[in-house]
C-alpha cells in the first residue's frame, strides 16, 4: 500500500508541475521555500518554529534518543556508573537517619490516598 501511495503522490506531483508554466513553477518553488522558513503561528498569532526548525529538532531528538539508548544498553562503564549513582541515592534515602522521615511521609501519603473525599 505504501508503494501505491508513493506512486500516486509522484504522479500527482508530476501532473501539477507539468501543468504550470515556467513563471508559475518558480512562484510555486518560492512559496514552498517560504513555507519552510516562515515561523508557524498558533491560534493566537504567536510565532513558533519554522518547518525547517521542526524537522531539524525532530532529527536531533531522534539522534539523542539513539545515543542514550546505546549508552544505557551497550556501554558497560556508563551502566555501572548509573547503577552506582542510583544505589547511593537509595542508600541515602533509606539510611537510618532518614528512614523514619521517609516511612512517615509514605504512610501519610497512603492514608491520604485511601481516605474517602467528601464531595
Image (cartoon, helix red, strand yellow):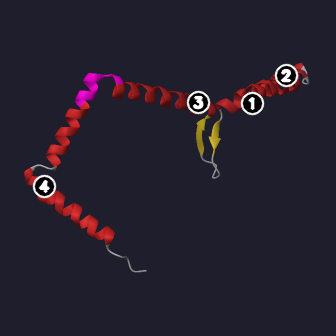
Q: Which residue is mark 3?
A: 55
Mark 4 to mark 2 CA distance (whole Å): 71 Å
Q: Which residue is mark 2?
A: 14
Q: Nearer the viewer, mark 1 or mark 2?
A: 1
Magenta range: 74-81
Q: Determine whether the residue tagged by mark 3 lies in a helix, strand or loop.
A: helix
Quarter occupied by the C terminus: bottom left
Image mark for residue 1:
1
| Residue 49 is one of the magenta-drawn residues | no
Crowd rating for badge 3 (residues with CA inside 10 Å; few <14, some 14–19, many 20+): few
Image mark for residue 99:
4
Q: Nearer the viewer, mark 4 or mark 2?
A: 4
**Snapshot quadrant of residue 67:** top left
Residue 63 as seen in the image, left or right of residue 25:
left
Q: Nearer the viewer, mark 4 or mark 1?
A: 1
Considering every residue shown, the one lying at the far front of the view is: 1
Amino acid at each position: 500500500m505504501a508503494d501505491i501511495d508513493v506512486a500516486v503522490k509522484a504522479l500527482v506531483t508530476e501532473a501539477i508541475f507539468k501543468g504550470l508554466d515556467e513563471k508559475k513553477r518558480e512562484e510555486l518553488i518560492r512559496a514552498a521555500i517560504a513555507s519552510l522558513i516562515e515561523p508557524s503561528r498558533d491560534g493566537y498569532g504567536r510565532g513558533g518554529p519554522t518547518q525547517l526548525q521542526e524537522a531539524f529538532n525532530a532529527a536531533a531528538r531522534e539522534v539523542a534518543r539513539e545515543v542514550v539508548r546505546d549508552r544505557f544498553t551497550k556501554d558497560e562503564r556508563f551502566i555501572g556508573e548509573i547503577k552506582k549513582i542510583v544505589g547511593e541515592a537509595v542508600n541515602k534515602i533509606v539510611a537510618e537517619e532518614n528512614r523514619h522521615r521517609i516511612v512517615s511521609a509514605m504512610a501519610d501519603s497512603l492514608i491520604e490516598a485511601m481516605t474517602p473525599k467528601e464531595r
